[in-house]
Amino acid sequence: MIQADLHIHTKYSLDSSINPKSLVDQLCAHPSIKVIAITDHNTLEGYHKVRELVFAYPDILVIPGIEVGTPVGDLIVLGADEMPPRPWDVKEVISFAKDKDCIVIVPHPYREYGLRNSAKYYGVDAIETLNGCAPSNINKLAENLAKEMRLPGVAGSDAHKIDELWTVCNEIQASLDIDEILNALKKGLVKVFPTGKSIRF
């Protein structure tokens, strides 16, 4: 069993100020969350930098990820260590992810840049039902969407500033192995919860 935050941005996202070194320092100090996914906007630079920094810590795992901006809304691809080819159409991004054995998550479906109800028409793997930057009524809509689509719900702090980290958590029935974690997420072997640190209600 591991605890993870599956939606974190670094300064390599244009709208984020989180320094990779500060992120790793906080992760090392955290008592329970030891798995994170770096999901910068349209780049893997932040992931590569954080991965270098955690190399010396065997109890920490960094999952490669990207938050890809498409014309109809954002998608998170977890497990990809390369960028999908352009143009970033939803169907093409999902096809890329399937070919690479990655998983596709719809982040904050009812917030800005969310897929909203159109998520129903694509073969995604999970819905972000608990977003640390979304109010409870918006997260509830996402939760209802996941139930309607019979998909697992996952959580992400969606942190863009250092004090936004660790607001939510995923408890995943897996060990510190990326493939095992991704498979567990696909199977719905995950529970999401707010940490009590700070989340909007």
Image (spheres, rainbow, N blue to C red):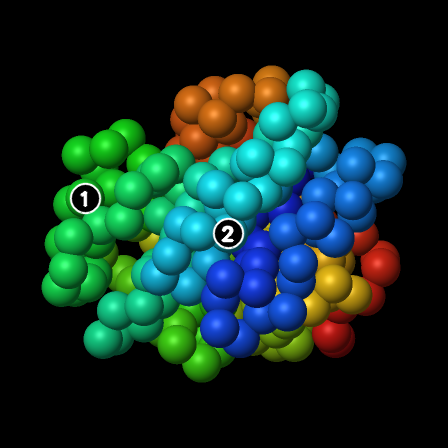
Taking the image as shown, residue 95 lies to the left or right of residue 162, namely left
Marks 1 and 2 close (CB-CB < 8 Å): no
| Circle 2: element type | helix
Q: Which residue is at 28% across, 30% downward?
A: 101
- The picture places residue 183, in percent across and down from the top left corner, at 42, 26
Q: Nearer the viewer, residue 167 or 13?
A: 13
Q: Which residue is at 13% across, 64% downward?
A: 87
Taking the image as shown, residue 72 lies to the left or right of residue 150, namely left
Q: Label 1 sits on what residue type?
A: Phe
Q: Is residue 64 above or below residue 72?
A: above
- The picture places residue 152, in percent across and down from the top left corner, at 46, 44
- The picture places residue 156, in percent across and down from the top left corner, at 59, 55
User: Which part of the image, by quadrant, shows the C terminus?
Assistant: bottom right
**Which of the two discs, 1 and 2, sits closer to the camera?**
2
Query: According to the image, label 1 marks what residue?
Result: 96
Q: Which residue is at 66% across, 62% downward?
A: 18
Separation (CA) of disc 1 from disc 2: 21 Å
Looking at the image, the residue that sits furthest to the bottom is 112
- The picture places residue 13, in percent across and down from the top left corner, at 49, 66
- Of the two numbered discs 1 and 2 on the same chain, state the one appearing first in sequence: 2
Taking the image as shown, residue 107 lies to the left or right of residue 34, namely left
